[in-house]
Amino acid sequence: MIYRALTGRPAFAGVDRHAVAEAARHGPPDPRRFADVPDDVALVLRVGLAVDPDDRWATAFELRVALEHALAGRLPDAQRQRAHALLARSPWSAAA
């Protein structure tokens, strides 16, 4: 929902649930392609939309705090590194 609120589009799209599931397996497109999203906010979204639940934020509260920090330009380096490590394994999708 955060991705859609910031970009005006869903993170994963498809004509049916199977197509959406397939899109999710490839990861979301970089939100900065569609909206003026700060880099740290994009990193928080990437972690939040990770395919593997172990790569995602553990709780909604953890996501909220990371997003607040990112919006304020204070995302901790450890969280930035976490997102960059995820992007190295699972880059942004090229899908539009």
Image (cartoon, rainbow, N blue to C red):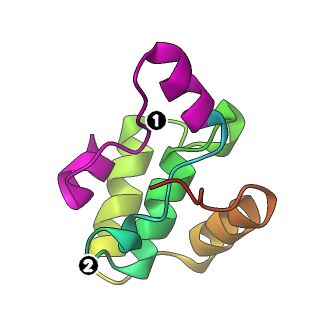
- Residue that label 2 marks: 36
60 or 96, which is in the foreground?
Answer: 96
Disc 1 is placed on an element classified as loop
What is the residue that sits farthest to the front in this orientation?
Answer: 15
Above or below residue 14? Residue 93 is below
**Is 78 situated left or right of 33 in this image?**
right
- Name which quarter of the figure residue 82 lies in: bottom right
Three-letter code, disc 2? Asp
Q: Considering only order in the chain, which callout, 2 or 1, is on the residue closer to the N terminus?
A: 2
Q: Where is residue 28 in the image (x, y as percent from the top left)?
A: 51, 50
What is the residue that sits farthest to the right in this orientation?
Answer: 89
85 or 33, which is in the foreground?
Answer: 33
Residue at left 27%, top 79%? Answer: 72
Q: Position of residue 23 (x, y in %)?
A: 56, 36
Magenta stretch, residue numbers: 1-24
Q: Where is residue 90 in the image (x, y as percent from the top left)?
A: 73, 55
Above or below residue 76? Residue 82 is above
Screen quadrant of the N terminus: top left
Q: Does the magenta stretch include residue 59?
A: no
Screen quadrant of the C terminus: bottom left
- Residue that label 1 marks: 59
Q: Is residue 20 magenta?
A: yes
